[in-house]
Amino acid sequence: MFSLSTVWNCGKSLSGREMINEIKALGFKRIELNFSLTESIVHEIVQLHKNGEADISSLHNYCPAPPGIELKYATPDCYSLASLNDEERAKAVHYTKRTIDTAYSLNARAVVLHCGRVEIEEKTRRLSEMYSQGLKDTRFYNIFKSAMIKERAEKRDVHINAVCRSLEELSKYASGKDIKIGLENRYYYREIPTHDEIGMILNRFQGSNIFYWHDVGHAQIFENLGLAKHIDYLEPNAYRIIGFHLHDIEGTKDHKSPHSGKFDFHILEPYVSNGTLKVLEIHPPATGDDIKRGVAYLNKIFGEGES
């Protein structure tokens, strides 16, 4: 069974009920709550759930958005779980616990986390621009990419240790509520974790409630940019995948409806089981009809009978 993320329609100034009903009208029985929802909308959805009108599979941290932050800035990275600033990291942990509390009140299975970042200049967008200009594998592209990789490698360890301290506290908190934590692979190279860091972090929490959450678009964009192979995310972590963010990709543009880009979803088949959470994370301007066609396409691949 597929879920659809509210990231698709949260920007329409809808009420919680309108948002949920619009998604249910597309045939979805389960829904993921995204990270830019106000406290009042989340409260409304909790009431819908209590009335049997909303089945929530998962939440994307931070949900609800932290207070005092404009929604346009209320990203999953507004507070970094890998920050070396104790005050910021404490806020990240605090508001993640609030997401876990919300997940518990909704009987959701999992919370999807961004794990923060290595504090260096963001350069993935520049690399992406060069890729779009047809400069991949040119001398300048390779020099730029190598310097980006080297800078991050030199500064990552303290941030990996910081995020693990955060996860240790969050794992204990979530386990008391039977909530799983999914660590999502990222779009920006400075963010945590890269493909080789997923296993490194998961190994520290072997046997815990911390798992891997695979974002299809992010992994494929890293392959397109020459930063990693898509399979490098899947194969080493096959038995630790709790969920997928499914969307199509073209070049470095992702979050398209399935079957509207160039990604071969068949490569995911060995890693998807009946218990795996499968969430379509589709951005506008995709229409409801686009999403319906995408679900029909995925059903043929994964043998799902309904959305």
Image (tube, grey):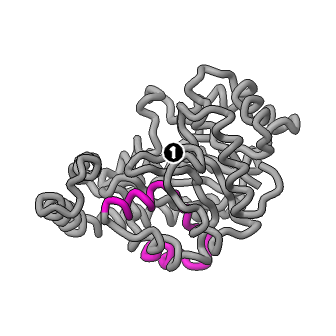
Q: Position of residue 170 (x, y in %)?
A: 55, 59
Q: Amino acid at mark 1?
A: His
Q: Residue at x 46, y 35 (%)?
A: 74
Is residue 259 toward the left or the right of residue 220 in the image?
Answer: right
Q: Nearer the viewer, residue 135 or 96?
A: 135
User: What is the quadrant of the N terminus in the image?
Assistant: bottom right
Seen at 57% across and 35% down, the residue is: 286
In reply to whether residue 204 is colored magenta, the answer given is yes
In this view, the residue in front, 196 or 42, is 196
| Residue found at the very far right of the displayed protein | 52
Q: Quadrant of residue 91?
A: top left
- Residue 7, horizontal then vertical, whole percent: 58, 37
For label 1, the residue is: 255
Find the magenta span and give its range: 199-225
In this rendering, the answer to whether 212 lies above or below 29 is below
Is residue 300 magenta-colored? no
User: From the viewer's perspective, is residue 56 above or below residue 204?
Assistant: above
- Tell me where residue 18 sits by quadrant: top right
Camera sees residue 68 = no
Instruction: Tell me the SS state at disc 1.
Output: strand
Tell me the residue at 54%/62% (across/down).
264
Residue at the image position 80 percent from the left and 44 percent from the top: 29
Residue 183 rendering spot, x and y as whole percentages? 52, 61
Compared to 302, does 23 lie above or below?
A: above
